[in-house]
């Protein structure tokens, strides 16, 4: 998705300050003292992490303190509740005292300060303790004391119970990016017939035995993005918008922030299992890359592909061994050039590490199941299901060949082909040690951002079809009973359907208010026409999809947050929508005159520099099937998804367990 970089980013070297108070000096950092991980954080026993301490001395602005001179003599202690007396962090973790670091950053205190370009200046003294772990469950109190005790910051941490028994051999985590219950409901309406109010068939998701809800807040803002929400799902640690696998610090370096170990790093270190990621996005995008990424900036695409292959090489850190199957789009980060890390050819870098390479659907199917595989099928995101299956002429308009030719990629797999092949490879390569696979339906989110509801719902139905096919595949492999399947989202959008629209009547009216009379609400909303066969019209896409994407009566839908745009509610046959365009040489977005010209104007609710819809607050559903399914009922935080999966995989180990996880 397209997230605007905060304007302050250029000043503060990428420091992300997005918060409930518009701007914060640094999220999670009260009282001029920062402990990262901060107060209220949970840990898996034995999970590796870094601890950063920062002492802030604002030179000016509302918090000006100590003439802008940070205390360099600050002390840091840790104590286990009910345990021995507090001791220094260095002695507790048996580490040498790390060197003192110093830097300066700037930030805006509010919108008035931003308009006036009046930034506040903060000087910082800091230390970081790298790669430590807490093995004993319980509560820990970490204290940072600065300026001779005048400023004290406390963090209470909880190490969760041990759970070393492995109950699931394999885990498949499906993420419908941006997917909400409202979208699932709309997708069901499009693809499944009702008779007198009763559905004659259901989604695969409807057949899952357990459903729960997760709360998606970021650590310092109540609207999340896909980077830190994916990171919460994979590591059990919340973070800041745009950050992954780290707690965001205020230093200028985007890669030195305190890290937390992710599920694939744990799984590799403890069990040596196979793991993979599949996405319909470019593979360096937040949801797939957060499995291995440790950075404050999701936009560091090239370096993050290097981290996916080699792990974090610049700091002592646990390695994940590289993915066993890695399928998606995003050739820009692999072709040598400005998009790849240090300009290198990452197809070749992967091949040097023993990877088989596939650049199209035909060769994907033929990949050897026993060899590590990289499959990159186009530049940017994969074209969506609707364009790959129904409006296929749109594929030819692209210049997205994964080998870099000025041509269109046309031999494209979808989520289903990539996921099923990944299961074959991971099953073979994981053997008795099992596997972890994350498969993402990315364009539910991407198409909701551009208000293209049909393309978003098409990809949601593709996800459902993929989940169904995966269950059948696991059954055929004899692995269904060994595999925990979780289907969830990372966040939502404020989407819903409120009636139908008579597209013929709407197009025939001249003025915007009259066009709105085409919308039928309550008893006039009628029934879905997407499931009614039209003689001579067949897309041949099977039972899990609509038989008619362009009926006269369509769903009338919308989002709670959008730019100025025009609605006619008809499917966009020529390709994805571009709802708003900027006035010449500005970032002021207005209705795109070329989008739905026969529709009526819907004025935006967002700042006028937003070109697209944005994420919303809603809890998102969690569907579970297989070993440990029972723990997924109820309402919980997004980080709990990680703890539930980690416990089911037996990743919560004390130092003393026989599997011997201590820095193996
Ligand atoms: C900058 O902000 C401070 C308060 O934080 C205020 O006293 C000062 O007048 C502002 N300067 C300008 C140029 O707006
Ligand atoms: C803080 O000082 C800098 C100069 O170092 C100045 O540019 C800035 O406007 C000051 N900010 C405030 C809020 O006074
Ligand atoms: C943190 O722990 C201390 C000591 O156990 C306790 O006094 C304090 O109330 C706790 N704070 C929070 C926010 O839980
Ligand atoms: C890693 O360190 C090298 C050498 O200092 C530097 O050139 C490179 O940019 C660093 N990479 C990242 C991702 O920080
Ligand atoms: C698919 O990839 C294979 C192997 O790289 C290549 O031989 C074949 O020509 C490609 N097919 C298409 C349709 O591009
Ligand atoms: C991969 O495994 C599947 C079984 O799930 C099998 O049908 C297929 O032929 C294998 N592919 C290759 C290339 O060996
Ligand atoms: C827009 O910016 C370009 C490049 O700076 C300039 O050549 C052009 O005249 C500008 N157009 C308008 C309408 O201001
Ligand atoms: C409504 O949208 C139109 C078209 O983009 C725009 O010209 C107008 O300024 C908008 N009205 C408001 C109140 O934003
Ligand atoms: C193992 O656990 C016991 C009991 O909790 C403890 O006394 C001992 O120090 C532990 N050993 C190691 C190596 O941590």
Image (cartoon, rainbow, N blue to C red):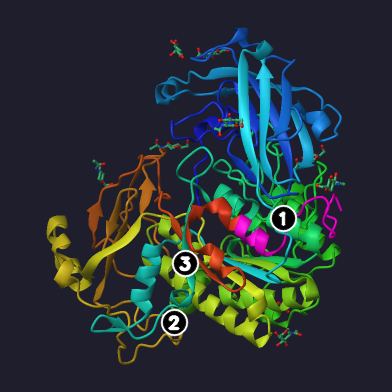
Label the magenta part by its dominant secondary structure.
loop
Q: Which residue is mark 1?
A: 652
Mark 1 or 2: in front is 1
The correct choice, above or below, for 285 with respect to 98 in the image is below
Single out the residue that lies furthest toward the top: 67
The residue singled out by tag 2 in the image is: 544
Residue at mark 3 to residue at mark 1: CA–CA distance: 24 Å
Q: Quadrant of ligand 7?
A: top left
In percent of width and height, residue 330 lies at 63, 60
In front of the other: label 3 or label 1? 1
The picture places residue 609, in percent across and down from the top left corner, at 39, 40
Question: Which label is found at residue 211?
Answer: 3
Q: Is residue 42 above or below residue 36?
A: below
Q: Is residue 271 visible?
A: yes
Label whose residue precedes the other's in the sequence (3 or 1): 3
Indicate whether residue 660 is drawn in magenta. yes
Residue 591, image x, y percentages: 31, 50
| Part of the protein shown in magenta | 643-664
Q: Which x, y percent locates residue 491?
A: 47, 54
- Callout 2: SS: loop
Q: Say which element carries label 3.
A: strand
């Amino acid at each position: 998705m397209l997230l605007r970089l905060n304007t302050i980013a250029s000043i503060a070297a990428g420091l992300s300050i997005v918060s409930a108070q518009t701007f914060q000096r640094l999220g999670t950092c009260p009282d001029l003292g920062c402990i990262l991980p901060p107060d209220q954080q949970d840990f898996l026993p034995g999970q590796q992490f870094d601890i950063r301490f920062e002492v802030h001395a604002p030179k000016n602005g509302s918090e000006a303190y100590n003439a802008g001179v940070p205390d360099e003599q600050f002390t840091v202690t840790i104590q286990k509740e009910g345990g021995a007396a507090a001791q220094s962090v260095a002695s507790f973790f048996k580490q040498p005292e790390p060197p003192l670091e110093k830097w300066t950053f700037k930030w805006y205190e509010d919108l008035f300060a931003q308009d006036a370009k009046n930034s506040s200046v903060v000087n910082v003294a800091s230390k970081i303790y790298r790669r430590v772990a807490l093995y004993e469950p319980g509560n820990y109190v970490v204290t940072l004391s600065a300026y001779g005790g005048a400023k004290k910051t406390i963090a209470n941490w909880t190490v969760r119970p041990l759970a070393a028994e492995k109950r699931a051999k394999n885990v498949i985590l499906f993420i419908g990016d941006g997917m909400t219950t409202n979208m699932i409901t709309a997708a069901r309406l499009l693809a499944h017939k009702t008779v007198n109010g009763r559905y004659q068939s259901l989604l695969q998701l409807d057949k899952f035995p357990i459903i729960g809800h997760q709360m998606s807040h970021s650590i310092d803002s109540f609207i999340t993005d896909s980077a830190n929400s994916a990171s919460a799902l994979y590591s059990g640690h919340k973070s800041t918008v745009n950050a992954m696998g780290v707690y965001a610090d205020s230093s200028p370096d985007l890669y030195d922030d305190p890290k937390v170990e992710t599920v694939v790093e744990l799984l590799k270190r403890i069990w040596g299992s196979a793991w993979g990621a599949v996405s319909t996005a470019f593979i360096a995008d937040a949801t797939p890359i957060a499995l291995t990424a440790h950075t404050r900036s999701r936009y560091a695409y090239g370096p993050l592909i290097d981290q996916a292959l080699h792990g974090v090489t610049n700091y002592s850190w646990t390695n994940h061994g590289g993915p066993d199957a890695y399928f998606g789009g995003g050739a820009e980060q692999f072709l040598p050039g400005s998009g790849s890390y240090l300009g290198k050819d990452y197809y070749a870098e992967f091949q040097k590490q023993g990877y088989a390479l596939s650049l199209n659907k035909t060769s994907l199917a033929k990949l050897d199941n026993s060899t590590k595989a990289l499959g990159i099928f186009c530049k940017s995101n994969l074209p969506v299901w609707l364009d790959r299956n129904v409006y296929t002429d749109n594929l030819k308009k692209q210049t997205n060949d994964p080998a870099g030719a000025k041509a269109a990629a046309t031999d494209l797999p979808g989520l289903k082909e990539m996921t099923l092949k990944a299961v074959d490879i991971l099953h073979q390569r994981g053997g008795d040690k099992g596997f972890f696979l994350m498969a993402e339906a990315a364009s539910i989110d991407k198409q909701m951002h551009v208000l293209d509801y049909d393309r978003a719902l098409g990809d949601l139905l593709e996800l459902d079809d993929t989940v169904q096919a995966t269950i059948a595949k696991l059954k055929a492999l004899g692995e269904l009973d060994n595999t925990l399947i979780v289907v969830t989202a990372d966040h939502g959008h404020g989407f819903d359907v409120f009636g139908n629209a008579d597209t013929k009547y709407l197009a025939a009216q001249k003025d915007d208010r009259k066009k709105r009379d085409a919308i039928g609400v309550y008893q006039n909303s009628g029934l879905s026409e997407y499931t009614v066969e039209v003689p001579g019209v067949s897309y041949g896409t099977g039972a899990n999809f609509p038989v008619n994407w362009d009926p006269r009566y369509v769903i009338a839908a919308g989002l709670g947050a959008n730019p100025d745009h025009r609605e006619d509610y008809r499917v966009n046959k020529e390709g994805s929508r571009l709802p708003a365009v900027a006035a010449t040489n500005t970032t002021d977005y207005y209705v795109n005159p070329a989008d739905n010209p026969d529709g009526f104007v819907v004025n935006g609710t967002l700042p006028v520099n937003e070109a697209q819809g944005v994420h919303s607050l809603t809890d998102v559903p969690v569907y579970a099937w297989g070993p440990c399914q029972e723990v997924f009922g109820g309402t919980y935080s997004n980080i709990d998804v990680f703890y539930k999966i980690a416990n089911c995989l037996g990743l919560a180990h004390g130092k003393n367990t026989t599997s011997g996880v201590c820095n193996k």
